[in-house]
DNA sequence: CTTCAGATGCTCT
DNA sequence: GAGCATCTGAAGA
């Protein structure tokens, strides 16, 4: 399948967040490609969203990446020890992004198990195998992503997203976003998208 | 299945 | 100095 181009990300953030479900996220390293299917996303829109790091046009050293071109990678450190992966959306200078909250591996489970637990896949518990990438921090750890990839883009670097059809029989569930209770009315916005069913 | 505490360091006031 | 777009392991139901 073809890589998604910049025009894909230059659109309305809610549309991009919804349409990223089912797409293939590719993490390139020297020796191998780690691929996975995106199953959970959230939209963050600076213009109207108190949960967005760039709410109110805020520009700081951390948030200036959100003003870069669509398809730019935004990775930040959270809770002192985990990273969150985002893709910048909307036209340039319109600060917004999609948080990639979850995925399921498409092969190379050994590399992912190594990144997450420093163990072989066959030595993981059944629980661990079922939850390899079902959270934003887990996903970044599984793919070996840190702020080293911040401000790169999806068009020729270590990361890209390939087009892919939605799996047959899958459904999209829409809910409010996770972990932003401080954001007042924005905490209720139905801006989280989860791919359910046969993935 | 659920709740709970603790880890840990950057970011912005 | 306060707070954070989280995860883990332990313990209880």
Image (tube, coloured by chain):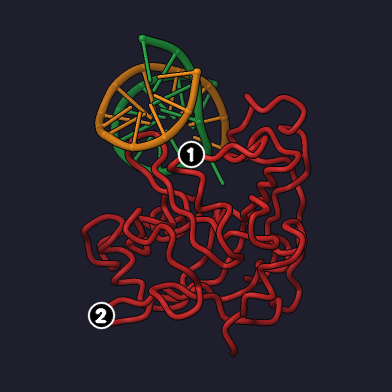
Chain colours: A red, B orange, C green
Q: Is A177 left or right of A88, judged from the image as shown?
A: right
Q: Residue at x 64, y 55 (%)?
A: A93
Pick out the residue farthest to the bottom: A1
Circle 2 sits on which residue?
A: A30
The location of residue A198, given as percent across then percent down, is 66, 71
What kind of element bears circle 1? loop
The location of residue A21, given as percent across then percent down, is 66, 67
The location of residue A92, given as percent across then percent down, is 64, 61
Q: Residue at x 25, y 63 (%)?
A: A114
Chain to which mark 1 belongs: A
Residue A29 location, quadrant: bottom left
Chain to which mark 2 belongs: A
Q: Residue at x 68, y 53 (%)?
A: A94
Which corner quadrant holds the C terminus of chain A? bottom right
On screen, A20 above or below C1? Answer: below
In this orientation, which residue lies closer to the viewer: A137 or A133? A137
Lower position in the chain sequence, tag 1 or tag 2? 2
Which of pointers 1 and 2 indicates the residue nearer the eye?
1
Residue A161 location, quadrant: bottom right
Q: Residue at x 74, y 66 (%)?
A: A11
Q: Is A42 left or right of A101, judged from the image as shown?
A: right
**Alpha-carbon neighbours of circle 1 within 10 Å: few (<14), some, or many (≥20)?**
few
What kind of element bears circle 2? loop
Circle 1 sits on which residue?
A: A60
**Alpha-carbon neighbours of circle 2 within 10 Å: few (<14), some, or many (≥20)?**
few
In this orientation, which residue lies closer to the viewer: A72 or A32? A72
State the CA–CA distance, disc 1 to disc 2: 33 Å
């Amino acid at each position: 399948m073809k890589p998604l181009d910049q025009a894909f990300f230059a659109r309305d953030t809610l549309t991009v967040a919804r349409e990223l479900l089912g797409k293939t996220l590719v993490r390139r390293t020297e020796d191998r490609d780690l691929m996975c299917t995106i199953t959970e996303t959230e939209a963050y829109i600076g213009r109207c969203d108190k949960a967005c790091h760039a709410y109110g046009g805020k520009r700081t050293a951390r948030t200036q990446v959100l003003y870069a071109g669509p398809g730019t990678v935004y990775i930040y450190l959270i809770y002192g020890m985990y990273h969150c992966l985002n893709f910048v959306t909307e036209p340039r200078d319109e600060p917004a992004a999609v948080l990639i909250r979850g995925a399921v591996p498409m092969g190379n489970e050994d590399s992912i198990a190594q990144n997450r637990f420093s163990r072989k896949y066959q030595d993981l518990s059944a629980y661990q195998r079922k939850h390899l990438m079902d959270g934003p921090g887990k996903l970044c750890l599984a793919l070996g992503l840190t702020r080293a990839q911040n401000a790169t883009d999806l068009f020729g670097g270590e990361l890209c997203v390939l087009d892919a059809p939605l799996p047959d029989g899958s459904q999209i569930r829409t809910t409010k976003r996770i972990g932003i209770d401080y954001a007042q009315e924005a905490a209720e916005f139905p801006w989280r998208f989860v791919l359910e069913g046969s993935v």
